[in-house]
Image (tube, helix red, strand yellow):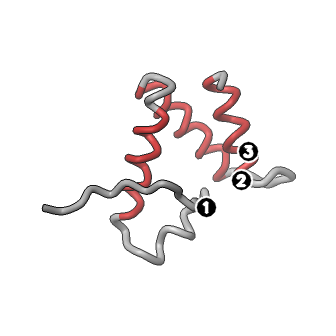
């Protein structure tokens, strides 16, 4: 029986560059783990929409904030966490 993927820590670059070295299957697994943890705090649809919007803003980031700062600030503002 295959052991389920259950990381304790995830190192994540928001543009995905750190995930490509291992395998394409790691990306959906990371997303699943992330959403599973986020859904402990907020409803799935609300968390999914907030994440998609925050990630979309990160893709358009021209500075002065880092992608991580911008993503986190958008999530805080959207979810009030």
In the picture as drawn, the residue positioned furthest to the bottom comes out as 21
Question: Mark 2 highlights which residue?
Answer: 67
Q: Is residue 30 left or right of residue 11?
A: left
Would you name the residue on which mark 3 appears?
A: 70
Residue sitting nearer the eye, 17 or 41: 41
On screen, residue 29 versus residue 15, left or right, reads left
On the image, the x and y values in percent for residue 27 come to: 41, 60
| SS at circle 3 | helix
Tag 1, which secondary structure? Answer: loop
Residue nearest the viewer, comparing 12 with 6: 6
Report the Cα–Cα distance between label 3 and label 1: 13 Å
| Location of residue 78 with respect to 4 vertically, above or below | above
Q: Quadrant of residue 14?
A: bottom right
Tell me the residue at 55%/32% (across/down).
Answer: 50
Left or right side of 81 for 22 = left
Q: Distance between the Cα atoms at labels 2 and 3? A: 5 Å
Q: Which quadrant of the view contains residue 66?
A: bottom right
Q: Are marks 2 and 3 in contact (CB under 8 Å)?
A: yes
Tag on residue 13?
A: 1
Quarter of the image that includes the C terminus: top right
Residue 34 sits above or below residue 80 on the image: below
First in sequence, mark 1 or 2: give its number: 1
Residue at 57%, 61% in the rendered image: 11
Q: Are marks 1 and 2 in contact (CB under 8 Å)?
A: yes
């Amino acid at each position: 029986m295959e052991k389920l993927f259950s990381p304790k820590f995830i190192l994540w670059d928001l543009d995905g560059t750190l995930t490509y070295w291992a395998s394409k299957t790691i990306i959906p697994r990371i997303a699943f783990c992330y959403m599973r943890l986020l859904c402990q705090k907020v409803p799935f649809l609300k968390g999914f929409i907030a994440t998609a919007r925050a990630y979309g803003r990160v893709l358009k980031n021209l500075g002065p904030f880092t992608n991580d700062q911008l993503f986190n600030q958008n999530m805080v503002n959207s979810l009030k966490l």
